[in-house]
């Protein structure tokens, strides 16, 4: 656990600065808010809460313990079921991640990037170890390639004889339209393991962990559970809309895979960021591009190597 915490912290500590570099290139006004995030809890499982706080303190994470009246002062609309909480003041959230993604995509194209939307079917290698990627439409030979396909990455890594135990933690989402005024920042209710974020689309309620693979249908009772939990905190909520299921690519040690393939030096991986794919997107891109370019780094990248599973 401490190994995972240490090496998640190493990249989480760089996550916001990495986004700041990108945000110098695009306009994110009105899309990013710096109001922190609140975790709160009841008086059950307090040993777990104490352990979490102590680990983050040991790692140097900025946190501010909150008493019930302080939670109420920050978020007065939440039902008063809590006995304590913690504010992570340096955290940010976005009002609409899709809009930011599209701005970054436009920047990529303006900088000379080229985008092809095709289904990759196989990866093979030339006599000099260059990746040959065959799609449903064509075949391409590259000097170097990166597999960054989230929960679907295992379909490709299996082809190059890498036994990476990637699975998917399926997470569910719903929106309550027109209720984003009830919160100023994201909050997570730890006892029931779900979170709520104020978005342009309304209040986004997310949570649950379901090891259900890539092909099974959504589990309706998990949506019902999310809706009931949200209405427990905010009894005034009306009917929800917009249900969907996301695939969180997860590995047994809860660390991502970033680095070269075990067998092919010109093939690189960047996937397995579990619940923190959006958070770690910018720093992961910076790390993997540095690896591809052969740049040196002061970071210890060994804990993210696929070799740990082989």
Image (spheres, rainbow, N blue to C red):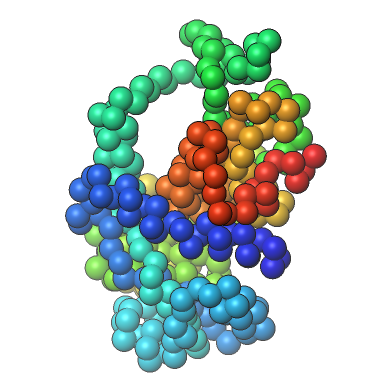
Q: Residue at x 61, y 26 (%)?
A: 266
Can you say which quadrant of the picture contains the N terminus? Answer: bottom right
Which of 13/165 is in front? 13
Where is residue 265 shown, x and y percent of the image? 65, 28
Can you say which quadrant of the picture contains the C terminus? Answer: top right
Q: Give above or below for 98 relative to 83.
A: above
Q: Give above or below for 47 relative to 224.
A: below
- The answer to whether residue 171 is visible is no
Which of 144/134 is in front? 144
- The answer to whether residue 83 is visible is yes
On the image, which quarter does residue 130 sit in?
A: top right
Which of 21/84 is in front? 21
Apparent side of residue 54 relative to residue 67 in the rendered image (left or right): right
On the image, which quarter does residue 270 sit in?
A: top right
On the image, which quarter does residue 125 sit in?
A: top right
Q: Residue at x 46, y 76 (%)?
A: 62
Q: Residue at x 50, y 88 (%)?
A: 83
Where is residue 160 shown, x and y percent of the image? 71, 24
Where is residue 190 shown, x and y percent of the image? 54, 72
Give the farthest residue toward the right.
310
Q: Residue at x 44, y 90 (%)?
A: 67
Which of 21/91 is in front? 21
Give the farthest residue toward the top.
138
Give the farthest residue toward the front.
296
How many numbered markers are drawn? 0
């Amino acid at each position: 656990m401490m190994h995972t915490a240490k090496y998640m912290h190493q990249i989480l500590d760089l996550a916001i600065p990495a986004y700041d570099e990108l945000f110098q290139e695009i306009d994110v006004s009105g899309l990013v808010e710096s109001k922190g995030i609140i975790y709160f809890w009841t008086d059950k499982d307090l040993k777990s809460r104490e352990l979490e706080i102590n680990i983050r303190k040991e790692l140097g994470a900025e946190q501010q313990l909150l008493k019930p009246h302080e939670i109420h002062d920050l978020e007065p609309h939440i039902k008063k079921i809590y006995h304590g909480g913690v504010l992570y003041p340096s955290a940010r959230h976005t009002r609409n991640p899709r809009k930011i993604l599209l701005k970054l995509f436009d920047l990529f194209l303006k900088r000379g990037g080229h985008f092809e939307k095709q289904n990759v079917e196989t990866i093979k290698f030339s006599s000099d170890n260059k990746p040959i990627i065959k799609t449903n439409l064509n075949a391409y030979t590259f000097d170097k390639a990166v597999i960054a396909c989230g929960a679907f990455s295992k379909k490709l890594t299996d082809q190059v004889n890498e036994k990476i135990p990637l699975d998917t933690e399926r997470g569910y989402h719903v929106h309550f339209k027109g209720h984003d005024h009830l919160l100023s920042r994201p909050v997570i209710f730890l006892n029931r393991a779900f979170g709520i974020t104020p978005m342009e689309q309304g209040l986004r309620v997310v949570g649950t962990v379901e090891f259900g693979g890539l092909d099974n249908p959504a589990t309706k009772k998990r949506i019902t559970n999310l809706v009931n939990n949200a209405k427990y905190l905010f009894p005034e909520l009306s009917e929800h809309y917009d249900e969907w299921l996301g695939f969180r690519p997860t590995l047994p040690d809860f660390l991502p895979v970033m680095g070269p393939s075990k067998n092919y030096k010109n093939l690189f991986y960047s996937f397995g960021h579990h619940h923190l794919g959006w958070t770690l997107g910018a720093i992961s891109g910076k790390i993997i591009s540095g690896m591809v370019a052969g740049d040196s780094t002061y970071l210890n990248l060994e804990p993210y190597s696929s070799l740990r599973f082989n």
